[in-house]
Image (cartoon, rainbow, N blue to C red):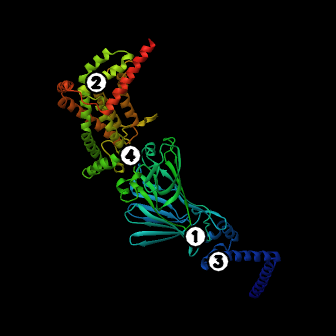
Amino acid sequence: MEEKKFDLNSAIGFVLLGAIMLWYLYSNQPTPEELQEQEAQQEQIQEETKSLSEVNDTSVTEAVINTFDTDSLALSKAQNTLGAFAYGAALPSAKEGTTTLENNLVRIEVANLGGQITEVELKNYKTFDQKPLYIIKDGNANLNIQFSTTDNRNLETKNLYFEPSLTKSGEDQILSMKLKVAANKFLEYRYTLKPDDYMMDFSIQSTGMEQAIDGSKSIDLNWQTTSFRTEKSVKYENQYTDLRYLFNEDEFEFMSPASDFNEDEAENVNWISFKQQFFTSILLADKPFEKAKLSSKNLVQDEEIDTVFTKDFAAAIPLKMESGELDYNMNLFYGPVDYKVLREYKGKDLDRIVSLGWGIFRWINKYLFLPVFYFLSSIFSSYGIVIILMTIVVRILMSPMVYKSYLSSAKMKVLKPEMEEINDKFKGKDNAMKRQQEVMALQRKAGVSPLAGCVPALLQMPVFFALFRFFPSNIDIRQKGFLWADDLSAYDEVLKLPFNIPFYGDHVSLFPILASVAIFIYMQMTQSQQMNMQQPQQEGMPDMQKMMKIMLWMSPIMMLVFFNSYASSLSLYYFISNLLTIGIMLIIKNFIIDEDKIHAQIQENKKKPEKKKSAFRQKLDDAMKQAQAQQELQKKNKK
């Protein structure tokens, strides 16, 4: 009885559930208006599918339909924004991702978005605080093409997804990044990285893009990098961070690193270098770029605050389509500013990127100091010892000039009593011309030239300025220690100050102190020598003795302040150089120069008939005589 009751109840329950379901389906069936809206949406999807099919790829069109079949508005928006380039937005590669190129020198990451390099790590170098050294990272660089489409859209490759394909050819790694508008129509970036090389082949080529890219409008390759700070002193590093470029095959130019903003335009550009002190990014063209607009902006206004970046570099390069296509073969270099490395790329003049100075200073560094440095560093492992030995070589080569200067000083010292007699004999402003004539006649008879002591000193100046450029640009001494200095390319810090002294800094460097003391001793020794070469004090002329006393104190102080934040290698060189010069001068004075013999020789010279004057000397004497005659005529007229 109970089972029958249960069966009856179950049947009634099923009937009720079925009735409810029928009522629900009936009440939720589409209205005629909703049916029309669904038909319209289906027609819209079919039209968008047809538009994409015109791009000529059925399989990818199906992918687009599958991607957007639940959101026709998203498909419509992509189509309206990108036009034919919406094809690439529907590929599986249209997502965040990178591909790695790597050899034993460099690791490079290339992103799907933009097809551009987003990370470059130099594997054999570290930053000043021993962190991995990146030239590109976290969006500090950009390589982007701006262009217009044939349907009047303005697009940039940095906002579009590329399809990556990594292959190998022998040991070369080849990465193809394609921005597609169809299966066989695309804009391609091709990167080729060779083993043991910082240089990478880079090309921009298009296939079948004449109906997608409007070649009649501007197409610009924009290359930009914000350079990282990698060295101990951001201020010092920034002084050697600049934009350099070669144009017209052999014409070289660079932008002043001291300016807040530089802008320039160049034609027939062979390469562009975004140079840091010791590292660089270079874009080279197989066929020179017709034009390039270049700019450099200084980002270090306060070295206490601006500690991450140094300069912002940018280059805008117009591209042209030939026969409806882009075809540019180039190279990208990410690596050290190393003279040995850069000179290996023959015929490109990349060694100009190394800051060796200009004119004669560069010549001295290139053909004298670099060969000597490389030879010594091949023998000795300590770069501090190499710098000391190099200083000794330079001082030995310069010692004949020191001897000439000291000999001239000794001769002038012997003649000084007679020159003072002439000065006493022809006193007053009215006799200034006559006094000068008599002094010159005495020096000529004795065979003494006042310029003989100045010329050797002037000849040493190119060496001074050449070395001033040599050490800060030499990457071989970077992060190489000596004695208390842990990095010869940076300042040596023996004491950290709790405050910052204007022009001096917040630290104390010992090598500049030692160099300043050596300069002070050297100048004290040479002051008497210089005074011997001075003619007696004349009326109306500045007091040279006072000026020399001022310089005696000012030069060491300037050295102390100026070099406190400079490379310790430079201060080490000047310290050793001045010590050696002091020693050479003592040897010359005590063992080589004999003032009695010099005096006897001068007296013999005075007895000899005067040599025929040179044309220059004759013109100078005639000019002085004319000036003296005019002066005497003015006196008579006044009377």
The amino acid beneath tag 2 is Ala
> Alpha-carbon distance for marks 1 and 2?
81 Å
Q: Which residue is mark 2?
A: 441
> Which x, y percent locates residue 259?
50, 43
Query: Which comes before the other along the chain, label 3 or label 1?
Result: 3
**Quarter occupied by the C terminus:** top left
* Front one among 347 and 504: 347
* Identity of the residue drawn at 40% across and 34% down: 561
Q: Residues within 10 Å of mark 2 (few under 14, many from 20)?
A: some
> Alpha-carbon distance for marks 2 and 4?
38 Å
Query: Which comes before the other along the chain, label 3 or label 2?
Result: 3
Give the structural element (helix, strand or loop) at label 4. helix
Q: Which residue is mark 3?
A: 53
> Which x, y percent locates residue 179?
56, 69
Label 2 near label 3: C-beta < 8 Å? no
Q: Which residue is mark 1?
A: 324
Q: Is residue 407 left or right of residue 239?
A: left
- The answer to whether any part of residue 19 appears in the image is yes
